[in-house]
Image (cartoon, helix red, strand yellow):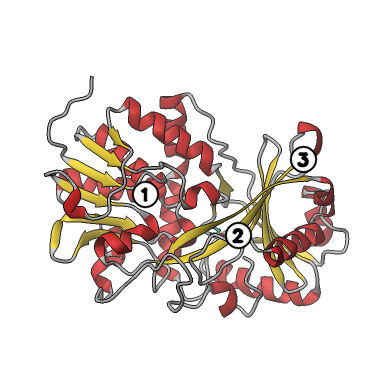
Amino acid sequence: MLSRRRPDVTVVGAGPIGLAVAWRCAIRGMQVTLYDPAPGSGAAYVAAGMLAPVTEAHFGERTLTALLVAAAARWPDFAAELADQTGRELGYRTEGTLFVALTSDDLAEAERLWTYQRDLGLPVTPLRPAELRAREPLLAPRLRGGALAPDDHQVDPRRLVAALRAAVEAAGVRMVTQPVAALAELPATGRVVVAAGCGTAALTGVPVRPVKGQILRLRAPGGAAPGFRHVIRGYADGRSVYLVPRTDGEVVVGATVEERGDLDVTAGAVLELLRAASDVLPELDEYALVEARAGLRPGTPDNAPLVGPLPGRPDVLVATGHYRNGIVLTPLTADLVADLLATGVADPLLAPLAPDRFDMTGSTCDPVGAGGGAEPESSRAGRKPWS
Ligand code: GLY
């Protein structure tokens, strides 16, 4: 029987971050209520689920990279605990990620990035074409080279959300499937955690904006597993693409990076993603195209998340702005927030994520056609906006 006493914590938003925050608070003994009209239907429903501290380490983002490394280190224990407590399969796989480059120009660009990553001390091992094909025989014969990032793993975000929903239910979290249009609408509560992705802007004024990603799902013929095991980050004739194989036969092909807030799927995006995917792994031409969808990453001006108290509202924490890294950051964000709520002491990892590092006057999260903000990383690198 659920207790109806005043909650210690109200969480707004039941994507992976909000669900995991609710779970971690509940298992620390807090009374938790979680609001979302459609749990798990936001960015996580579209996301590929790459746990990629190394291949997502971009120029000029050292602080964020250190955070991603710390976050990825929590995944083995988090996945084991969640699977153990719920009896659910998460699609967590640790075969690693391959960079592959098709042309010499692609190789030069990919090398520039992994040289930077290696200089940071991150594990990336360059591989010759024959070494790549020894690992993945279905890779295109004409590719020029690549590298292995063994610490970049994957999980299936849809399975993750299902498991977290089971975990919060078992932990006694009260789920309310109603929208929250304003924090003032919430019944008298204790502390509030707003983990509503892009919607956090309208609720709190923090500067998150939508960064659209279009993404495809393919399925291997005959119900078989895909013919490759690693996550593949392909550079193909000036395009970039990632391919994420699941044991159930699904292959996720992503993704565009667009400074827009609509959810349209465009013919051009589908064409370019499939062209790059097929160039890297020609066998994909035989796979069924089963889904094409767009999602909205919650982006921030410096690409790092916003986690901590809202300026002037110590009773309200935000946990949003996880941009391209929401799935890998889920366990870390949840524990940092739950520990802060339980002890009142902020972990030093929270310092660079404080929402008050930005001016919050006039921020918006316009749901359609939002422009401005930071340039997408794929454009900074001079590539077409598929990354
Ligand atoms: N994490 C990859 C993406 O956001 O497309």
Foreground mark, 1 or 3, reads 3
Marks 2 and 1, how far apart at CA: 26 Å
Foreground mark, 2 or 1, reads 2
Q: Is residue 55 visible?
A: no
* Residue that mark 2 sits on: 214
Q: Quadrant of residue 215?
A: bottom right
In the rendered structure, which disc, 2 or 3, sits on the residue that comes first in sequence? 2
Q: Pick out the residue farthest to the right.
A: 141
- Disc 1 is placed on an element classified as helix
* Residue that mark 1 sits on: 332
* Residue that mark 3 sits on: 220
Left/right of residue 26 with respect to residue 224 in the rendered view: left
Quadrant of the drawing holding the N terminus: top left
Q: Check disc 1: other Cα within 10 Å, few if <14, some if 14-19, many if 20+.
A: many
Amino acid type at circle 2 is: Gln
Left/right of residue 194 with respect to residue 92 in the rendered view: left
In the rendered structure, which disc, 2 or 1, sits on the residue that comes first in sequence? 2
**Where is residue 4 drawn, in percent x and y?**
16, 29
Amino acid type at circle 1 is: Leu
